[in-house]
Image (spheres, rainbow, N blue to C red):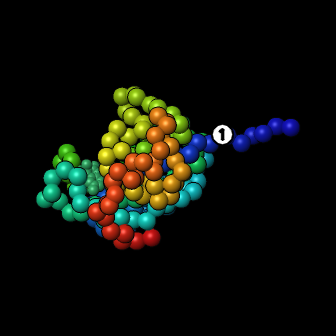
Amino acid sequence: MQNNTIPKSAVYIALGSNLDNPIAQLQSAVRALDTLPDTQVTAVSAFYRSKPLGPQDQPDFINAVAALETALLPLDLLDHLQHIEQQQGRVRLRRWGERTLDLDILLYGELIIESERLSVPHYDMANREFVIVPLYEISPQLRLPNGEKLANLADKLKPHHMEIVAI
Ligand code: ROI
């Protein structure tokens, strides 16, 4: 008997916005993720308000993490994420500054990717409470490809400084 299903990977995407109604930006991005080919959104964290990492003279961010099951290859997924960012009128005013929508691939299964366009796991995820806390919320048993338990990273960031603004 033939099995025509394409193998899928568990992928985690960080969502962030601090311009143009950030909560609506994230809600719209989650809907867009769920319509990508060969992809389902399997979990979405709460939406957290976080102080900006970078210049402080910019609005607070809204951050969340979404879990996907996808058959898209990493760079194809990246193309789709950049398309969603553009569709939602992405503006980025300066480096480390305000932006309408950021969609970053945090983890792609157990893969480690170091290419010109893409580094997975995300290079700084372990230090960012606005990434680790929502990721831990939806996947408390997760380990990073290097074997590190997400629970240990989450413990190190306690107590966190964010407020849940939407579920
Ligand atoms: N700061 C917070 N709190 N959340 C983000 O998503 C975020 N994204 C960024 C920079 C500008 C580094 N700071 C951030 O790209």
Q: Position of residue 132 (x, y in %)?
A: 39, 52
Query: Measured along the vertical axis of the image, is residue 14 above or below residue 5?
Result: below
Tell me: 58 left or right of 101.
left
Callout 1 secondary element: loop
The residue at the far right in this view is 1
The residue at the far bottom in this view is 166
Q: Residue at x 32, y 50 (%)?
A: 128
Q: Position of residue 7 (x, y in %)?
A: 66, 39
Q: Which residue is mark 1?
A: 7
Query: Measured along the vertical axis of the image, is residue 83 above or below residue 120?
Result: below
Q: Is residue 55 visible?
A: yes
Q: Residue at x 82, y 37 (%)?
A: 2
> Can you tell me whether the CB of the residue at mark 1 lies under 8 Å from the nearest atom of ligand 1?
no
Kindly identify the amino acid type of the residue bearing the numbered disc 1: Pro
For the C terminus, which image quadrant? bottom left
The residue at the far top in this view is 115
The local crowd at label 1, few if under 14, some if 14 to 19, many if 20 or more residues have their Cα within 10 Å, is few
The residue at the far left in this view is 57
Q: How many marks?
A: 1
Tell me: 1 left or right of 10.
right
Q: Is residue 85 visible?
A: no
Q: Position of residue 94 (x, y in %)?
A: 18, 48
For the N terminus, which image quadrant? top right
Q: Residue at x 52, y 47 (%)?
A: 142
Q: Residue at x 61, y 47 (%)?
A: 38
Query: Measured along the vertical axis of the image, is residue 36 above or below residue 31?
Result: above
